[in-house]
Amino acid sequence: MDMIFFDSWSVLIRTTIIGVLAYVALVMLLRVSGRRTLSKMNAFDLVVTVALGSTLATVLLNQEVTLAQGTLAFALLIGMQFAVTWLSVRVGWVRKLTTGEPALLLHRGAMLRAAMRKSRVTEEELHSALRSAGVARIEDARAVVLETDGSFSVIHSDKQIGEPVLKGVKIPTESG
């Protein structure tokens, strides 16, 4: 096994220069793409972020990949994310495909166990969300919604809830 701890100064200098330039290029492209690229992430955004990180690592460490190729890869990933988010604001099926829908997990103090199972949320996680929102008893919550970014929204029982607050969340009827 051949272990190399130091090859040459030129490799280290290249990594430093390309690293700084690739970082600057990535930051500039993220700034140009707008706040949405850096907002709370859903699963789609996480995939793009991981791909950007992988691309940055490849540009830094693989001498066969040029800075221009890496910058083009950054631009393609960010451009595709911009296009998908632009479409998701305008086309319902694209929005559903990329972000999913929020899930109502608790309604008027009652846990919706089928929705919790489907969303893979435990009672402990639901109780934790209630505690984080300052709700001491489950009966004191009007609703708990699992948002598309994985966060929980808790609506207190003293708040009026209706269509504006729960827009996009399916509320169960008395019959099921």
Image (spheres, rainbow, N blue to C red):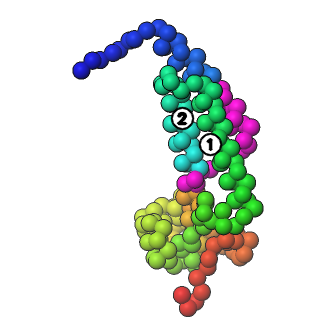
Report x, y in % for residue 7. 40, 11
Out of 63 and 8, give the one closest to the viewer: 63
* Disc on the earlier residue, 1 or 2: 2
Helix, strand or loop at mark 2? helix
Report x, y in % for residue 109. 54, 77
**Which residue is rendered at x = 53% and y = 26% of the image?**
65
Secondary structure mainly formed by the magenta segment:
helix
Looking at the figure, which quarter contains the C terminus? bottom right
Q: Label 1 is placed on what type of residue?
A: Leu
Q: Are marks 1 and 2 in contact (CB under 8 Å)?
A: yes
- Relative vertical location of residue 128 with respect to residue 53 in this rendering, above or below: below
Report x, y in % for residue 13. 53, 12
**Which residue is rendered at x = 58% and y = 82% of the image?**
172
- Looking at the image, the residue that sits furthest to the top is 9
Mark 1: give few (<14), some (14-19) or many (20+) Cα within 10 Å: some
The residue segment tinted magenta is: 24-44
Report x, y in % for residue 152. 56, 61
Q: Which residue is mark 1?
A: 77
